Image (tube, rainbow, N blue to C red):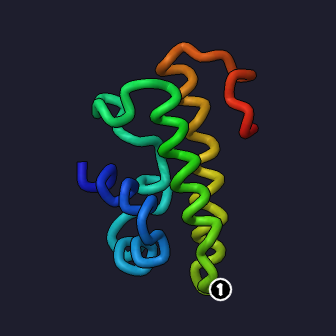
Amino acid sequence: MLTLSVGEALEMVPANVFKVTLSEFQLKSICGMPDLDDARYGSYELAISAIQKRQNRISAVTDSVLRAASIECIQSLEDSKDEIRKFYGQEKHRDQSR
């Protein structure tokens, strides 16, 4: 549950999330899909929207020290879209961002 909350924080200030949490959490654990059992992500569209918001915020990180983590996190979030599609029974072509 804590890693899911840390992942949500990527939507706010991802640079701070990386600085504070990477010593305690693995990058892939915080850069995954949202909690699909949470009503805030209760549809395919809501879950994908959360992923895209996180990716957009992370893309704006300018700290060169955090650049590698940012790139890896964005890719991990992109990969999680496949799991979201499977969970909601969506066809791959429905997500126009890929």
Q: Residue at x 54, y 36 (%)?
A: 48
Q: Tell me residue 84's x, y (percent).
A: 52, 29
Q: Secondary structure at mark 1?
A: helix
Q: Residue furthest left?
A: 1
**What residue lies at 47% left-to-right and 21% top-to-bottom?**
87
Placement of 68 over or under 33, stated as above or below: below
Q: Circle 1: is it few (<14), some (14-19), or many (20+) Cα within 10 Å? A: few
Q: Nearer the viewer, residue 13 or 64?
A: 13
Out of 70 and 28, give the one closest to the viewer. Answer: 70
Q: Amino acid at mark 1?
A: Ser
Query: Which residue shows up at 46% across the image and 42% down it?
Result: 33
Of residue 48 and residue 86, the one placed in the foreground of this image is 48
Image quadrant for the C terminus? top right
Residue 56 image position (x, y, % from top left): 60, 58
Lateral position of residue 7 relative to residue 89, left or right? left
Q: Which residue is mark 1?
A: 64
In the rendered view, would you say 2 is above or below 51?
below
Residue 92 position by quadrant: top right
Which of the 4 image quarters holds residue 57?
A: bottom right
Q: Nearer the viewer, residue 25 or 57?
A: 57
Q: Which picture quadrant has residue 6?
A: bottom left
Left or right side of 76 for 20: left
Q: Is residue 62 above or below residue 41?
A: below
Q: Position of residue 3 (x, y in %)?
A: 32, 54
Residue 19, percent across and down? 42, 80
Residue drawn 35% across the image and 78% down it: 20
Q: Across the whole image, how many numbered discs are drawn on residues? A: 1
